[in-house]
Amino acid sequence: MLLTSLAAWKDQALNLVREHIVLAEPIVFLLGFCEGIAFLSLLVPSSVLFLGIGGMHGAAGGQFWTTWLAGALGAFLGDIISYLLGRYFKNEIVQVWPLNRRPEWYAATVAIFRKWGILSILGGKFLGFMRPFLPVVAGAAHMAWPAFLFASALSSLAWSGAFLAPGYGLMALVR
């Protein structure tokens, strides 16, 4: 009985995804964008959602490549906005929520950035709570614009792929 209801639920979910498959890329773009925006990233669990979306979209017959690029582009544009916020507000950014309540987050992010520079941007997408603040710190520190763009583009591609691919891969194995 339980297996029958689980199978029915799975079929309903897949039918819903198939009916709205054209929305996958815009949704993934928006989630990636939210992930790149400082402060907003803390409210939207994009990485976890990417895992689920990858599996459901893959099971419904969706293409990995376009979804991957949509997520990466969203994250890249979010990073650019966060960089520009840091560049504009500089040290005043620590007076804004949540940094005004958790100054240790900013201090830890600054320490990582000072130690690793461009490598912190490349790997920063995988550093949890520091993820949205590294572009802000890079902007506040006046990191060179071309270096930031290069590092952010690569990290956005890696992050989007790393969190979407497992779901698509798993669905490819079970088909």
Image (spheres, grey):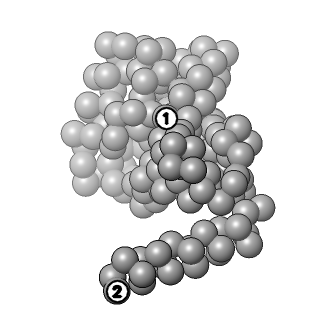
Residue 156 lies in what quarter of the image?
Answer: top right
Which residue is pictured at 41% across the width and 38% down the height?
Answer: 131
Determine crowd level at label 1: few under 14, some 14-19, many 20+ residues with C-alpha closer than 10 A. some
Pair 2/1: label in front: 2
Between 87 and 112, the residue placed more toward the observer is: 112
For the residue carrying disc 2, how many other residues have a C-alpha within 10 Å: few (<14), some (14-19), or many (20+)? few
Task: Please tell me whether residue 60 is drawn above or below residue 7 in the rendered image.
Answer: above
Name the residue at 32% across, 13% down.
115
Q: Nearer the viewer, residue 2 or 141?
A: 2
Q: Can residue 101 be seen in the rendering of this structure?
A: yes
Name the kind of residue labelled 1 in the image: Ala
- Vertical arrangement, residue 16 with respect to residue 160, above or below: below
Cβ atoms at labels 2 and 1 below 8 Å apart: no
Alpha-carbon distance for marks 2 and 1?
A: 36 Å
Name the spot of residue 54 as percent of width and height, x first: 55, 50
Q: Position of residue 6 (x, y in %)?
A: 41, 77
Q: How many marks?
A: 2
In this rendering, position of residue 86 left or right of residue 94 = right
Q: Which residue is mark 1?
A: 162
Disc 1 on helix, strand or loop?
helix
Q: Residue at x 48, y 56 (%)?
A: 52
Give the quadrant of the N terminus.
Answer: bottom left
Relative side of 109 to 172, left or right? left
Residue 171 locus on image (x, y percent)? 54, 49
At label 2, the amino acid type is Met
Does dot 2 land on a helix, a strand or a loop?
loop
Please say whether residue 27 is visible from this viewpoint: no
Residue 61 left/right relative to 86 = right
Earlier-in-chain disc, 2 versus 1: 2
Q: Which mark is residue 1?
A: 2
